Image (cartoon, rainbow, N blue to C red):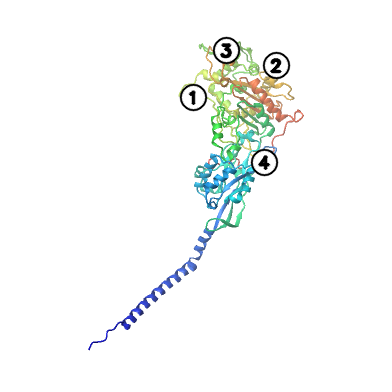
Amino acid sequence: MRRPLTLKDHHHEQRIFSFRLLVSAILVTLLTVGLVGRMAWLQIFQHSRYTTLSDENRVQTQAVPPPRGLITDRNGEILAANRPDFTVEVIVEQIPDLQRTLREIHQLVPLESDDIERFNKRLQGPRRPWDPIPLRGRLSEDEIARITVNQHRLPGVRVAANPVRHYPHGKLFSHVLGYVNRLNAEDLDGMTLTEQGDYAGTHYYGRSGVERYYENRLHGQVGYRQVETNARGRILRVLEQKPPVPGENLRLTLDMDVQRAADEALGDRRGAVVAIDPRDGSVLAFVSRPVFDPNLFVNGISHQDYARYREDLDNPLFNRALQGRYPPGSTVKPFIGLAGLDAGVTDWQRTIFDPGYYQLEDNPHRYRDWKRWGHGHVDMNKAVVQSCDTYFYDLGFKLGISRMHDFLSDFSLGQPTGIDLFNESSGLLPSKEWKRAARGATWYHGDTINASIGQGFMLATPLQLATATAILAHHGKQVTPTLAADALRVPPRPDVTLRHSENWQRMEDTMAEVVHGERGTAKVMAEGAPYRMGAKTGTSQVFSVGQEETYNEDELAERLLDHALIIAFAPVEEPAIAVAVLVENGRHGGSTAGPVARQVMDAWLLDDNGELAVPPPLNRTPQTQTAGTTPGGTP
C-alpha cells in the first residue's frame, strides 16, 4: 500500500519563516539602532557644528562700501563729489531668456558695444547668485522712464541709483585731482589680504593725482551686513549690519579763482602754470594744458574716447606741470648770479664787455648772445634785467659746474620737490659725475657754459621752477609744495644761506627791474599793476642752431619754435605768490608767458574792485597721515 503524497511540509516552512523573520528583525533592529545612533550623533554630539554650517548656508555676510570723501578747494568749493548715477541692472537668475531681454532693453535704451563687453566680463567673472549686474549707466530721465514703464514685461531688469565720483568742474582740475575708476582683477591680485578686505564691496579707487595719493584717507572703512538668504541665494531679510565709515573730506590749498585764471590765461596753448604761496608752500594753482575730462574715466572710458586722447599729438593725458622736463633757459640766471656772488667770483660792481658772443681762450668757437650786436658794458644788474647771455657764460665758466650744481640743488632743481603727488619728475641738474655715469663721457667747458644759461643738459619741471622761485622770494627759506591743507610737512633740506644776506634783497630788486625797469624783458607785465613784482623771463631752444646758422622764427614749424618761460613773485616787499609759467613753442618769455603770470598774480592779490588785498597764509591743522596707499601697498 502506497504512502499518501505530501504536497507541503508545514514544519519545514515554519522553520524557514521563523529564520527569515528573525533575520529581518535583527536587520531592522540594527538599522533602527544605526539610524537612531546617527540621529543622536548629528543632533546631540555634532549639534553645534551642523548648526554653524546651516547658518553659513542661510546667513551671508556682505560688504557695504563707504562713501568716498569729498575734495574741496581752500574756500570750500567742491572739486570732487559723489552723485547718484542711474544704472540699468540685470538679475540674471530672474530672466528666462537673457539674449532676448538684452535685445528688448536695447530697443528702449541704446547699448554700445563697450556696454555689452563690460556686462559679459562681469557675468563670466566670480559673483554671487542674485547679485545685480550693471548693464549701462548715466541714464537720462527719458531712459529711466522708458525702462520703468516697460518693467512689467522685463523681469529681472531694474533701475538703481549708485553713488559714483563726479568732478563738477570737469577739465579744470583734471591733472591735479586725477580720477578714480573701477577696480579690476589685476588690482585685487596686487593687494594683501588685509587690503582686499578694506576694498570688499568697493568698486572704485584713485588712479592718479590727489585721488591716488590720498586714497587711504578718501576711501573710508568698509561696512558689513548679515542677510538671510534662501537656497538660491536670494536675500530674504537683513539680520544685522555695521554701517561703513565714510572717507575723510580733503581740503586742498588750491584756490578756484587762481586756478581758473591760470587755465584761461593759457587758453588753447600747450603749457603749464604752477603758483605757490612762498610763506607756507601752499600750491595755489596747478595747471597743465591740454586737459582731459576725468568724468569719462570713472565708469570706464570708451575705446573711442581713449583712442582720441592717446592719438592726440598734444598728449592731453601728460601732466606737464609735474612731469614735463624742459630746459629752464634764462630763468636760472638769478640763481646763477647768487651762486657767483656767494662764491666770491663776482660782485655787483664787476663789469664785462659783451660784443655779442663769448669765447674761451685758445678756442675759436663763439657762444653767441641772444642779442647779436651785444649789450656793451654789463654788470650783474644789467645782465639780469636785460638777460645778457655773455655775462653768464663768463660767470658760469669762472664758477664751474660743481659749485653751480651744489648751489642750484638747494633750490629743488635736479630732484623731486616732495609735493604730495606720485610720479613727480626729478628733472636733470647735470654734473661731471652724472655725465660720466649716464653718457660715459668727459665734462667739457662748453657744457658748463651751456648750463650757465639753463641750456645744454639741464632740465626742470614747471613745479621745480615755481618752488625755486618761492625759496628765492622768501630769502632762502625752504618750502615743500603741498596740496592738502592739513599736510604741514618738514622741508627735506635746510634753508639756503648766503655769506652776505643782503644779496637776497638786492637780487629781488633787480628782478623787479625786469618788470618795472625801462629796459626790462618783462615790462609788459607792469602795465596798470597796483603792486610791484619781480620776474625773470626765459626762452629755451627746441633744437640746436649751428655756429653760422641764423634762427628765423618765421621759417620754422610751430612745434620747433622756442619754449617761453617766466618765473615771477609778488608783492616784492612781502612776497605772497610765486609763479612759474611755461608755454610750449611760445617763442618769447616776456610777451607770451609774462601776461599769463600777471593774470595769475592778479587773481590772488587783488580783490573784486581791483585793489591790492593780500590774503593771509592758510590756517592749517596738521594731519599725521599725509599720504594714502595704492592697492598693493605701494606708496
Q: Which of the 4 image quarters holds residue 183?
A: top right
Residue 357, disc: 3
Q: Is 268 in front, or is 413? A: 268
Chain-order first, disc 1 or disc 4: 1
Which residue is identified by label 4? Answer: 621
Chain-order first, disc 2 or disc 4: 2
Q: CA distance from mark 3 to mark 1?
A: 26 Å
In percent of width and height, residue 312 lies at 55, 29
Secondary structure state at the residue bearing disc 3: strand
Q: Is 604 in front, or is 551? A: 551
Secondary structure state at the residue bearing disc 4: loop
Secondary structure state at the residue bearing disc 2: loop
Q: CA distance from mark 2 to mark 3?
A: 24 Å
Which residue is identified by label 1? Answer: 435
Q: Is 257 in front, or is 108? A: 108
Q: CA distance from mark 1 to mark 2?
A: 41 Å
Q: CA distance from mark 2 to mark 4?
A: 45 Å
Q: Residue at x 36, y 76 (%)?
A: 23
In percent of width and height, residue 589 lies at 63, 21
Q: Which of the 4 image quarters holds residue 230?
A: bottom right
In percent of width and height, residue 305 lies at 56, 34
Is disc 3 surrounded by few (<14), some (14 to 19) or many (20+) residues within 10 Å? many
Is disc 2 surrounded by few (<14), some (14 to 19) or many (20+) residues within 10 Å? few
